[in-house]
Image (tube, rainbow, N blue to C red):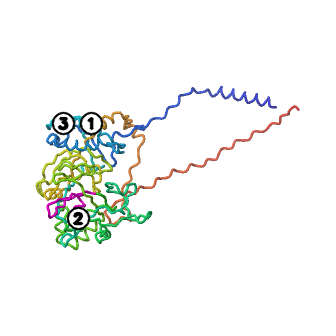
Amino acid sequence: MLASFSLGAEAARRHYRSHHPRLPEVAAIPPRALPYPQLPLPFEIPGAQYLPLAWADVKGWSEDDHLAAYKTFRASCRSINAQTSVPEAKALGGSLIEPCRVAKSLEPTDDATARTFFENNFSPLRISRLGEPDGFVTGYYEPVLEGSRTQTDVYNVPVYRRPSNLFVRGFNQASVSLPNKGSVYRKIGRRKLVPYYDRGEIEDGKIAGRGLEIAWLKDPTDLLFAQIQGSARIKFDDGATLRLNYDSYNGYPYTAVGRVLIERGIIPREEMSMQKIREWMAQNPDGAKELRRQNRSYIFFHEVNLSDKDEAVGAQGIPLTAGRSIAVDKSLHVYGTPFFIEGELPIESDRAKTPFHRLMIAQDTGSAIIGPARADLYFGAGADAGRVSGRLRHPMHFVMLVPKSLDPAVRAARLPVPDPRPSEKIARLFPQPPAAKPVVSAATSGKDETVAVVSPVPLPAPRPVIEPAREPRRPMKNRSHQQ
């Protein structure tokens, strides 16, 4: 029985092969690589867009004082060359080390040599926030204020140093300076952490009488603006000067008092300046107290050993240069990065449109400086610098100077080219459904908002049920089996 079954199966296989010739085997097509297979982008800054330029396309580049910019850049290089830690995980990383090495052995005495240095070691990159054409600048300065070493009837506004119970995770309480962003706590006992006091609580005396007073000022508005600028010079009656720099803050986000006045309709946006804020506060002392407390952020200072001739020290740890140093977003940029800033600013007067095209060096930061093309221009110390910096709130063109080792044009050439776009003939064979039109929903009716509501995707038609055709049964023949 088994023998006859095997012979029948073999006959069936021969019959199938004779009527179904075997097709030749075709090699499997390897999986197609993506257009950008596992390769990093040439140059990437979060939330930014950039465009490589030629030096001839940088407006105003040839008209700048490149020698002055070179001296400021070389001052940053002293700090960069002294670094022994791992480079920061940012777009430029440790790429400034090579230009700084070249600058160390170069002593230019004329503008042409300094300009050649920048053009040979950097590539210009037009940069802005994603979706925006320009960057934005403000100004800052170092206030010069009258004060006293002791409290008097005239000088009764304390300037505080950092309290010992102020705690920042990841930092030693004895650190020279603490970050200007992130959570800050008040340490109670050994374990308990609570948010630190805000401006209103500190002004009401929560940390008074603990020996934290560095000096005393006349006006709380003077202290507010010293905290906004991050440094100050306090002149005493005996002719001595005390230099103060940012040390730490209480952990609350900065709120611009000028923006509060604009939102309340007190000062028009086009007239807003630091001088306007001061005038309003002087005329409205009760309102000024409430306005100050809208900015819950509070800055603590420490004394710095600088003479009257020295400029304020920036976050990079070196003295700033008036007209050449800028504060940038430290979370995106590396200190020492050159930026060429071009546009028009009210330098001469409130309504002036003074052409401004200047190579400036990132040497400082600030809690309100956020974004890839956002800068605070340093103008020096004193009332004149304060008047100029207080007028600045303007869009400007930003050109970031990127070291040649990171030139995105060169690195982009190594990326594979995407597939060509399908022809019109192919596109007609595969028409795409029309895009959904924006529809005003009931939840937003009466508002100036529109919400794009996508129509539901239609379900495919159900497959028809097909009953299989029944084949007629063949009569079974009784076979006699030999036993």
Tell me the residue that label 2 is attached to: 215
Q: In this view, does 29 lie above or below 328?
A: above
Q: Which of marks 3 and 1 is nearer the N terminus?
A: 1
The amino acid sitting under disc 3 is Glu
User: Are dots 3 and 1 in contact, CB under 8 Å?
Assistant: no
Residue 37 in the image, given as x and y percentages of width and height: 42, 37
The amino acid sitting under disc 2 is Ala
Residue beneath the point at 34% across and 67% down: 197
Is residue 3 left or right of 264 when viewed as pictured? Answer: right
Kindly state the secondary structure of the residue where label 2 is placed: strand
Span shown in magenta = 222-246
Kindly state the secondary structure of the residue where label 3 is placed: loop
Alpha carbons under labels 2 and 3: distance apart: 43 Å
Is residue 367 left or right of 379 when viewed as pictured? Answer: right
Residue 111 in the image, given as x and y percentages of width and height: 14, 38
Seen as rendered, the residue at the extreme right is 483
Local crowd size for mark 2, using a 10 Å CA cut-off: few (<14), some (14–19), many (≥20)? many
Q: Nearer the viewer, residue 330 or 175?
A: 175
Quadrant hosting residue 445: bottom left
Q: Earlier in the sequence, mark 2 or mark 3?
A: 3
Instruction: Give the number of the disc on residue 107.
Output: 3
| Residue 217 visible to the viewer | yes
Q: Is residue 21 above or below residue 196?
A: above
Q: Nearer the viewer, residue 191 or 439?
A: 191
Q: Quadrant of the C terminus?
A: top right
Taking the magenta stretch, the answer to whether it contains residue 241 is yes
The amino acid sitting under disc 1 is Arg
